Amino acid sequence: MEEVWDRQTLLAAYEVMRRLRLGRFAGVLSAGKEARVYRAIGRDGREYAVKIYLTVTAEFRKSIQKYLLGDPRFENVDTSNTKKLFFAWARKEFRNLKRMYEAGVRVPRPILVHQNIVVMEFLGRDGLRAPTLHEIRHEIDPELAEQLAREAIDQYTRIYCCARLVHADYSEYNLVYLDGQLYVIDVAQAVSLEHPNAGDFLRHDVENIYRFFAKQLGVELPEPEELLERVRACQTKCPEKRREEQGGREQQYQAS
């Protein structure tokens, strides 16, 4: 049995399967120190990405506190309780996804959060997840590189100006390419603009954009300081709150 599947997680997974009428889990999409992401298939054939956070790593527990402490949305979280901390981290990812999705940012559509499990739209084709920009960096030609750089800056501006968040880990590892478009993933660590370290996280994210696209892919971009000012200028049109309709009825977010 995998480390992630302790008794509590197993019971939580059964509950998620019941609520969403999932037929089966169909393999691991990605595995990291803090979480594993599975592909799941509903009884109607719809695909989902199911992210399950580990509830046993002290290292991860310590690393996430800097993103929770200072975020007014999670100021009452008991960081001394490991289980509550991980449940809060899953809720944080879900809320950040929802906030970004409604602001018009290209992220996986959030579907459900339950305990340490987050369910979202599956980004991929034929059972394979969409690749990260890091994974396809050697296949990106100059024209595509310019397009992706524009999209990366545009998506980040929407995160900052429309969702009023800072991603705090924006890089080629958390940007994926699917059907000619760029998507943003792994948003649990994103913080509100009121977070005391939001400015530092913002600067680091912008420097990552410049490093990857300008230094590695050779795209001509303004220096990081000018890029930073462009993001802060918020010269982008934010959409009205987006609501998703599927099958003739509104898809409701479910949280617990």
Image: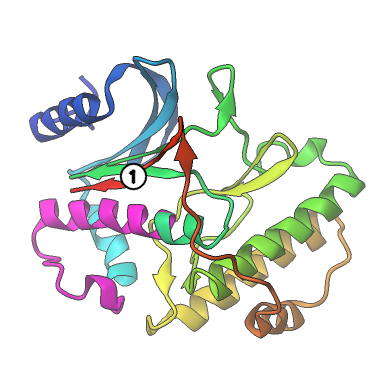
How is colour applied across the structure in the image?
A: rainbow
Percent of width and height locating residue 81: 8, 59
Q: Quadrant for residue 136, please give it.
A: top right
Q: Which residue is mark 1?
A: 252
Q: What residue is shown at x 18% (from left), y 45% (from top)?
A: 115
Answer yes or no: is residue 81 visible: yes
Does 120 sit left or right of 62 as displayed?
right
Query: What segment carries the magenta color?
Result: 70-97
Percent of width and height locating residue 133: 67, 44
Q: What residue is shown at x 77% (from left), y 52% (from top)?
A: 148
Q: What residue is shown at x 27% (from left), y 78% (from top)?
A: 72
Percent of width and height locating residue 41: 39, 19
Furthest residue toward front: 248
- Depicted 58 relative to depicted 48: above or below: below
Answer yes or no: is residue 69 visible: no
- Residue 77 lies in the magenta-colored region: yes
| Residue toward you, 241 or 154 | 241
Query: What type is the residue that disc 1 sits on?
Result: Gln
